[in-house]
Amino acid sequence: MKNTSKFITFVLIFIGCSAFSQKQNLDSLWKVYKNELQPDSCRLKAIDALAWSYKANNPDSAILLAENAIKLAQKIDQPKYVGNAYSAIGISHRNKGNYPEALKNYFAALKIREKINDKKGIAASYNNIAIIYENQKNYSEALKNNLAALKIREELHDKSAIAASYNNIGNVYWGQKRFEDALKNYRSVLKIREEQGDKKGISTTFSNIGNVYNSMASLEKNKIQKQKNDNEALQYYFSSLKLKEEIKDDKLSFAINYINIGTVYTSMLKAKEAQTYLGKALQLGIETNNKEIMLQSYANLSILDSTVHDYKAAFRHYLLYTTLRDTINNEETKKQTLKAAMQYEFDKKEIASKAEQDKKDAVVAEEKQKQKIVIGLVSVVLGLVILFLFLLYSRFRVIQKQKQIIELKEKQTQQQNLIITQQKQLVEEKHKEITDSINYAERIQRSLLASKKTLDENLKDYFILFRPKDVVSGDFYWASKIDDDKFCLVTADSTGHGVPGAIMSMLNMNSLKEAITKGLNKADDILNYTRTIIINTLANDGSTDGGKDGMDCSLLIFNFKELVMDCVAANNPVWIVRQNVRGAELMEIKPQKMPVGKHDKQNVPFAKHSIQLQKGDTIYTLTDGFSDQFGGEKRKKFMTKNLKELLLANAALPMETQKKILESRFEKWIGDLEQIDDVTIIGVRI
């Protein structure tokens, strides 16, 4: 390898300029660029190759090199290289996540390329601009620029580039959920790649089409259509897999295919098949030590386990997911540290090189000045010459000392800026980790709440005001069909809020579901059995007396055929507003003063209330979040009394209007204060 590098350097320096490839030794390119005896055209090609080499792994260095390339290209009137350099700077900023700067430089490259009519470069600029807009979710601008790139590439008859543009357009439509348009463009890609015999490209396109059908299935409410989309997704994923086997593609590609297939089978509730393919993906991740594949496998296995209600396995896989994620983040921190050290060494070399050149320039300038002085003052008295030279030398020493001080200060400032940048990145990464974890928990919790479909099928007129204090909530609402004529609705406030409250709410919902699965159909029996499950589950939480967590809740069972409502209230009341000749009247089913969980009254059975309902009755169930919220001019609690009056005054209005009034009143009441607890209010009109 050393001999090859020496030969390349020899050819570049003594024979002339030749094409530079990414595999060339970077040291050889540096030697060519720094050798001022080389023609500027050769030095320009060298620094251009260096900038593009650094753009992915060391974007800051790439930016500095590209800026120098711009100066050199402008000096020797090479506008094409100026456009290339702006493009390299744009890509480097994109890799850093600085999209505004990336766009700025992409547009600068586009302007130059349009001026010199570099059509291939113009298309590349439009393509780069579209990628940024797509990342920013600005799909209209992304589509506009992708179409501009496609038009030019069709004029150039560049089949591979045309396929790439169709693929990018398909990605934009997919992001917009315009699935038919996405499929149309992916099929255009497929046609070109089949003409070219590009099996790897065909395999990738099959996967993209499968992704679209997978997305369509996840949003489809019609069961038959959803099944059709799931089957289409599987067909394309398996077609992609077959081609990968023919061309012996890399293991990473196989693993991604396995994960895609596993997610579809999970959606189809085919747990055995999903387990098989997600397991294959995990095994490949372990064999290749690919932590990203392992991470995705654990996450999808956790979702699969939750789908089949195996919450212990779901929790175990989620722990493996979070542990591996933390390991990856620690490794990434080490990489960033190494990258920063490399950047520092690069900057130090640049500074040293500049200082050396400045020193040479200063020496040359000094020698010229001395020559002028000697020639001009030959006839001057020798003493005056000596005195002048002494003063000049003293001044030179002062300047040198000042220069050293300035350089030292600049180096210290650069080091401090580097430390600040690293600390900022670390804080941003940790914040993203926490946010991602909470959002993941919110998706799991949301999947367990009563679905809109279930509520719409069983309740004719209702509203739900659900406002968690944080992303996830201790409050929840849950529902289930009981027998043919009965419908169960639960409004609950679990112990705690945020992530702990959300975990507790999932345990509570699972316990309610288990009680009904046992065949219990009476309100008091269901809540008594649920309390037993919660106490037994938390008995081994590590505390002296066992877990005392649980929930406050109201459990209603409606028999709409006979207009009868059975209910049990644990710490949470149930209010009924009835219209009569005297106007609206609020009746309260007062709660028992004990929670659904471990308590000194845990052996006292819950009492069932049976209420004969009338047409037009409005039933309200709620947690204490609204009434306990501080606000108003005196910064006091809203209070239960005021909430009763508010509901009573508006009970005759449409349910959706009532919800909007409650939301508006809460927003006005809370003002600039912080929400202190989760808020849930449910209204059902008979």
Image: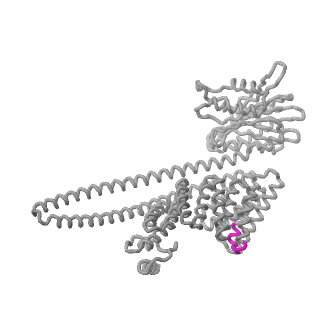
Residue 76 in sight from this viewpoint = yes
Q: Nearer the viewer, residue 157 or 309?
A: 157
Q: Nearer the viewer, residue 250 or 82?
A: 82
Counting from the top left corner in percent of width and height, residue 586 is at: 77, 24
Residue 199 magenta: yes
Residue 212 in which image quadrant? bottom right
Residue 336 magenta: no
Which residue is most to the right? Answer: 562
Q: Does the magenta stretch mainly form a helix, a strand or a loop?
A: helix
Counting from the top left corner in percent of width and height, residue 619 is at: 79, 30
Q: Nearer the viewer, residue 507 or 657?
A: 657
Counting from the top left corner in percent of width and height, residue 587 is at: 78, 24
Quadrant containing the C terminus in the rendered view: top right
Location of residue 483 with respect to 329 vertically, above or below: above
Q: Nearer the viewer, residue 411 or 36?
A: 36
Location of residue 621 with respect to 27 vertically, above or below: above
Specify start and end residues of the magenta stretch as a single range.
194-204
At x 84%, y 43%, the residue is 519
